Image (cartoon, rainbow, N blue to C red):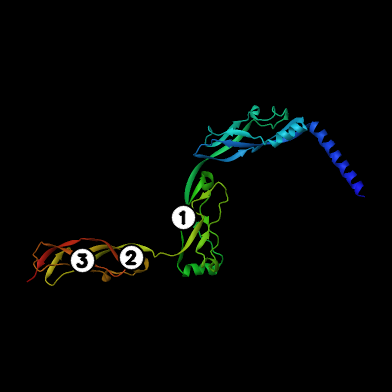
Amino acid sequence: MNKRIWIFLLAFILAAFIWFEINMTKTQKVNVEFPITISNAPSALVLIKMEPETITMTVEGKGQDILAFTTKKYAYHIDLKDVHYGKNYLPINWDEINGFKEHDLNIIQHPAIDDILVVMDNMSTQTVPIRLEFADDSSKVYFIENELDISPKEIVLTGPQSYLSRIEEVPSVPFDKEIHVQDPHLSLIQPKEAMVEYDVYTIDITKKEPAFLQKTMSLIPIATPEGISIFPPSVSIKILAEEELITILEEKDIYATAIVPDSVKVDDEVPVEIEVPEGVELLGQTPEVVRIKSISQ
């Protein structure tokens, strides 16, 4: 039994060898595919489309020559140094396809095309807002009630202008209160186009910073010692405070006082001192000094 198996295996190997030798020496017709490679694209431009991306040709030759040819992985190369924005039609030079003469192969048929279409676009940058997504309503309520925020709120995109023009905002992965309370980082959804890049790919969950507003308050009366009259009798101020505080602030909460020395006379100028509540910053006042108009004895 074992002898029969060995005879069978030997016969099979011999038959396979004979078949291989015949096919290696026999003239054959096969299709070979050339990938198209590029180089020297202008720095301000980027390739967004190329048709075709490969060239398929029918060649004729001995099996051993075809095998040697295909193992070399030849490609058709095009130089992009002279291309411009938009569509470019680059003529195919069939004589520049390498390997046929070297391996004694004949071209029987090549595609009925004369040019390779190359579409170039401008490289650009664009700033768009980040859209925060939520896993569920309870996570959204948690985010709002705990005065949370994201940082940064905007992202810089880099890529072909035609791709960037279609992007109005970048979404985050959904915020989940059960996950992101412990992990204050949130990823952004990856761009659909591989040629588009972000300047950041994660954002931070932070405590919301209070909003500050400026406000101008006018005709605040200036207090003076008894018997002293000044001009002008009121002052205007510009202040800065948190939104919640500044919206309820009134003129009566601001104190303006003329600092009058003991030895003062009519037409002297004296400074005006402004006192504001805690948490309010005085940015400026008009006037800073007033004139003594009269002094009653």
Which residue is denoted by mark 1 in the rendering?
154
Which residue is denoted by mark 3 in the rendering?
273
Residue type indicated by callout 1: Glu
Q: CA distance from mark 2 to mark 3?
A: 19 Å
Residue furthest left as drawn: 297
Mark 3 and 1 residues: CB-CB less than 8 Å, in contact? Answer: no
Residue 241: assigned label = 2
**Mark 3, other Cα within 10 Å: few <14 / some 14–19 / many ≥20:** some
Residue 54: assigned label = none
Q: How many marks?
A: 3
Q: Residue at x 87, y 42 (%)?
A: 10
Upstream in sequence: badge 2 or badge 1: 1
Mark 2 and 1 residues: CB-CB less than 8 Å, in contact? Answer: no
- Tell me where residue 53 appears, x and y as whole percent: 64, 38
**Mark 2, other Cα within 10 Å: few <14 / some 14–19 / many ≥20:** many
Secondary structure state at the residue bearing disc 1: strand
Closest to the observer: 97 or 50? 97
Closest to the observer: 173 or 291? 173
Q: Residue at x 36, y 63 (%)?
A: 212
